[in-house]
């Protein structure tokens, strides 16, 4: 008679080879697909950044033409936000880790999870097809009107932008809904809300933010396409529209998006710090509440991007106050992180070093953010490189550094091997120095009057030396990133075996083997604290007679029912392909053919649900 792990492996294992990866619904495989795909886009965005910095290294640069610079600059922003940071934190880290931390065997909707990845891949290819054709988005990552209208941009550039981001939003929304249901319903028995890991609180806050922030962006982009393709006048004053409508709708997404980027980084920090400080997080309930408050208050800050647009003074004061208020929950977390390290017995290995760098960069970026809450200062520095410095300290320093630390931290869990510690620490210092050299001088050159989105400049403004230092810093930063990935690649094949729990982490992902089996847990554990691996989670529910996982009550985490989970499926990739062709047809104004493929997508959905059992 087979043992329980053997039976579970037969039940949960997916077919090997390429076909297995194309039809997978395993959250770990989907997380890895997201991880490697976003790394490719990260490399593309990094190359674009180096081209921008090389162009601006000195006055009168000739590396890029004005048209090429506009496209590269726009695609750099779109890539880093929509194709790297958000899908890396939610799609890769969230997908791989969330069910493991919750004690579940998969996401709530495994096939929807697969669909979200294939839609993401299709949207990324769609956007980069425009760049490779010389028709990439060219109006900045926020693509202000009237630069996005037919009058000023008669080609397909803005259409690639609008349709590509609508396409990408389908993927992100599907993923966010899946995370919310998974967090509410698939927690291990005993995992009430107050026992959820802080990383899970962060992912819940992010997912709720995405569900509420993406509709305004989608509506804005739909209005733009209707104006460009069908003659509507949403943003045209002569036709009764209002160009400020674009900014209001965009920043209703755009400022919560900053916290959508930062919150997973905070969640990663709250996972790494207790492990290497060797103690539980100080003020655990306050930190959990602060993560949710950051997301909530972030929705009341959008118009601080619009202080120079002529809004009424009363409105300016409200948004200035909200901009200051959002600092409070962030500061709670910073103090909790620092107190946890100081009151513990910290071991400064590479993951904790990256979190230390994150805290330093986050504080610097946060301080300049508070400065923008002062209305006169914002009006004086708007559209200068001071703004560029601020958001790069936040978006790169405060978001990407925890991602890099998280790569080192969970590398043994994913691969079963240890990374090279000394080279990991070298990579941190090179990356940190490169980041400071690249972005800190931008504060100074911004105060000297250098405006953002200029493709070249004349000598004599006092900008030359600062831009040269920024470019040198960008190449140092690139070298640091290359050391990280070289270390991880070498360690994947040559690293020492890690065992299941090399760092003695507190959450449930460390309670299973490394790498985890296809079924995650032979027995779904029962937990009694937010750090069940330290408190030794009790044996729980043994489900070994089918493709099943446990569902629990929303508030208290009591065992509610046993769910039948769907197996691997080819329908998600087929549906994503049909949707991709649909967007290509919309781009080329083949409306009838687009309608046909919309119908095909509908038929695929019908076949999906007729020929396979319902999810969950």
Image (cartoon, rainbow, N blue to C red):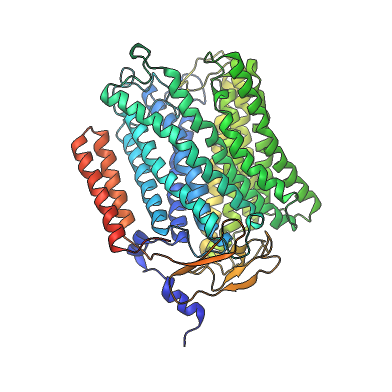
Residue nearest the viewer, comparing 427 with 41: 41
Query: Which residue is at a point 53% across and 19% down the rendered structure image?
Result: 451
Find residue 487 and report its horizontal and vertical position in percent.
Answer: 56, 55
In the rendered image, the quadrant that contains the C terminus is bottom left
Asked if one can make out residue 616 in the rendered structure from this viewpoint, the answer is: yes
Q: Quadrant of residue 79?
A: top left
Residue 375 in the image, given as x and y percentages of width and height: 63, 18
Q: In the image as oriented, which residue stretches furthest toward the left?
A: 592
Residue 502 in the image: state x and y as whole percent: 65, 65
Left or right of 570 on screen, residue 247 = right
Q: Nearer the viewer, residue 32 or 598?
A: 598
Confirm whether residue 55 shows in the render.
no
User: Is 448 placed left or right of 46 in the picture?
Assistant: right
291 vs 7, left or right, is right
164 to 240, vertically: above or below: below
* Nearer to the camera, 221 or 240: 240
Residue 352 at x, y = what percent? Answer: 68, 51
> In front: 546, or 229?
546
Name above or below for residue 13 compared with residue 100.
below
Q: Residue furthest bottom?
A: 1
Q: Where 536 sits versus 96, above or below?
A: below
Q: Is residue 541 above or below residue 128?
A: below
**Residue plotted at (52% across, 26% down):** 57
Q: Residue furthest right?
A: 343
Name which residue lies at 60% across and 42% down.
431
């Amino acid at each position: 008679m087979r043992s329980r792990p053997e039976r579970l492996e037969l039940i949960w294992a997916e077919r090997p080879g390429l076909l297995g990866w194309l039809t997978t619904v395993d959250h770990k495989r989907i997380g890895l697909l997201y991880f490697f795909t976003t790394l490719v886009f990260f490399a593309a965005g990094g190359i674009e950044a180096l081209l921008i910095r090389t162009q601006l290294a000195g006055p009168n640069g000739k590396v890029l033409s004005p048209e090429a610079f506009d496209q590269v600059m726009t695609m750099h922003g779109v890539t880093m936000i929509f194709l790297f940071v958000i899908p890396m934190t939610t799609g890769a880290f969230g997908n791989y880790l969330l069910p493991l931390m919750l004690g579940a065997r998969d996401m709530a909707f495994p096939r929807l999870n697969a669909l979200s990845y294939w839609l993401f891949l299709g949207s990324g290819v769609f956007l980069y097809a425009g760049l490779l054709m010389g028709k990439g988005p060219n109006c900045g990552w926020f693509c202000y009107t009237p630069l996005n209208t037919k009058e000023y941009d008669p080609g397909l550039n803005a259409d690639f932008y609008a349709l590509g981001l609508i396409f990408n939003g389908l993927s992100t929304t599907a993923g966010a809904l899946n995370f919310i249901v998974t967090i509410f319903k698939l927690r291990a028995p005993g995992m009430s809300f107050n026992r959820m890991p802080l990383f899970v609180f962060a992912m819940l806050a992010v997912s709720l933010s995405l569900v509420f922030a993406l509709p305004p962006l989608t509506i804005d982009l739909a209005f733009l396409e209707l104006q460009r393709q069908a003659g509507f006048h949403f943003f045209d004053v002569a036709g009764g529209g209002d160009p400020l409508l674009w900014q209001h709708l965009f920043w209703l997404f755009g400022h919560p998006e900053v916290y959508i980027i930062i919150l997973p980084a905070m969640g990663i920090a709250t996972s790494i710090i207790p492990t290497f400080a060797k103690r539980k997080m100080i003020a655990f309930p306050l930190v959990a509440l602060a993560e949710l408050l950051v997301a909530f208050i972030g929705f009341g800050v959008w118009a601080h991007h619009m202080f120079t647009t002529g809004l009424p003074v009363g409105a300016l004061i409200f948004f200035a106050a909200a901009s200051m208020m959002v600092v409070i929950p962030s500061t709670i977390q910073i103090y909790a992180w620092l107190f946890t390290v100081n009151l513990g017995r910290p071991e400064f290995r590479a993951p904790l070093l990256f979190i230390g760098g994150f805290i330093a960069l986050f504080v610097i970026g946060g301080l300049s953010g508070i400065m923008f809450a002062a209305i006169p200062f914002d009006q004086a520095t708007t559209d200068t490189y001071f703004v560029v410095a601020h958001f790069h300290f936040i978006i790169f320093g405060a978001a990407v550094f925890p991602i890099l630390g998280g790569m080192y931290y969970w590398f043994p869990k994913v691969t079963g091997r240890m990374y090279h510690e000394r080279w990991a620490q070298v990579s941190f210092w090179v990356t940190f120095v490169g980041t400071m050299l690249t972005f800190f001088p931008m504060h100074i050159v911004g105060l000297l009057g250098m405006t953002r989105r200029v493709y070249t400049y004349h000598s004599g403004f006092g900008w030359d030396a600062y831009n040269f230092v920024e470019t040198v810093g960008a190449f140092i930063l690139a070298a640091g990133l290359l050391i990280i990935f070289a270390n991880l690649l070498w360690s994947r094949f040559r690293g020492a075996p890690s065992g299941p729990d090399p760092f003695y982490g507190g959450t449930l992902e460390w309670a299973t083997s490394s790498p985890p089996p296809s079924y995650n847990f032979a027995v779904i554990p029962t937990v009694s604290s937010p750090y069940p691996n330290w408190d030794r989670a009790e044996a729980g529910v043994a489900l070994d007679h089918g493709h099943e996982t446990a569902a629990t009550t929303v508030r208290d985490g009591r065992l509610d029912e046993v769910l039948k989970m769907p197996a691997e499926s080819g329908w998600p990739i087929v549906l994503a392909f049909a949707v991709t062709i649909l967007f290509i047809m919309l781009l080329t104004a083949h409306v009838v053919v687009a309608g046909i493929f919309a119908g095909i997508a509908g038929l695929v959905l019908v076949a999906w649900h007729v020929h396979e059992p319902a999810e969950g």
